[in-house]
Amino acid sequence: MDAILIVEPKVHDLGGFSVRRVLPQLRARRVGPFVFFDHMGPARLTPGQGMDVRPHPHIGLSTVTYLFEGAIEHRDNLGNVQVIRPGDVNWMTAGRGIVHSERMPAAERATGQALHGIQTWVALPRRDEEVAPEFHHHPAASLPVWESNGVRLRLVAGEAFGFRSPVHTFSRLFYVAAEFPAGGSLVVPAEHRERAVYATDAALGVGGVELAVAHMAMLPAGTDVEIRAAQPARVILCGGDPLDGDRHLWWNFVSSSRERIEKAKADWAAMHYPPVPGETEFIPLPQY
């Protein structure tokens, strides 16, 4: 079996809680179509304190928010307003362009809350990079959930372990949230060409290699790999078919074309995107 690649996160302090950026990095640009992977928290926010990500644009990708704890309110310039809670999925496809904000709901802000979750970006295939933007919310109860050797699994998106998620995707992929009991084990089959395992809150054994907390293991293709947890652990599994070529990432933009990213930058600087209803703030284009 080829070697398992271990990816260490880069940690950023956002004033009250930390974010661990796992992808992209020089050693690991992506896994399947997943080109961005952020681990938020865990954090405990005091009453009056909240997460406020002002309106900002995206192109060429789908953003995926999945929470273990807390709540986030999504608003976009299509008019969607949706609170996401643990186990739910907010899947937003930017395509040719969308603007959204992410804030803590008023009730949770007033009382204080825990915040813990994963945010990922899925690059769109070249043929779909300019599709019309769309947003879909999937309640936790609508997603496949099953147990294997005592491990509880929820299929967030794609196909895996013989199950299919109702979340619409543009490429073949899988995204699974798993809860391991102490002493639990799970075999990840070789059904997808690119696969990764993320240890959210406890160390794991992955194919006989130790995987520390908040680290990702890139698995070799073509072979089954066993995951073992000595203590209770929440684990993210993700990956899929390789992308159809390289992608350029700049700020919140993803594209197979550098020229397309330059156009997106110019459009945002000139405020050509429709605004998010009810929002007056926005994040200015960074001056790198």
Image: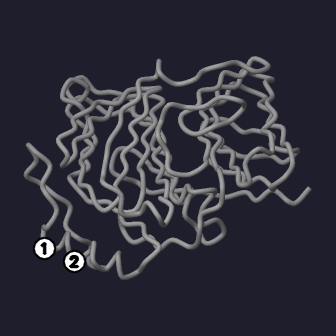
Q: Amino acid at mark 1?
A: Ala
Determine the residue positioned at 52% across, 25% down: 143
Query: Which of the image's four quarters has the N terminus?
Result: bottom right
- Residue 20: which disc? none
For residue 33, which quarter of the picture? bottom right
In this rendering, the count of numbered labels is 2
- Residue 266: which disc? 2
Question: Does residue 14 sit above or below 107 in this rendering?
Answer: below
Residue 162 position in % (x across, y down) = 71, 30
Check disc 2 and report its element: helix, strand or loop. helix
Mark 1, Cα crowd under 10 Å, few <14 / some 14-19 / many 20+, is few
Q: Amino acid at mark 2?
A: Ala
Determine the residue positioned at 31% across, 46% down: 134
Question: Does residue 12 sit above or below 172 in this rendering?
Answer: below
Question: Does the CB distance between marks 1 and 2 fall below 8 Å?
Answer: yes
Determine the residue positioned at 48% across, 66% down: 126
Mark 2, Cα crowd under 10 Å, few <14 / some 14-19 / many 20+, is few
Residue 19 position in % (x across, y down) = 45, 50
Residue 35 position in % (x across, y down) = 53, 60
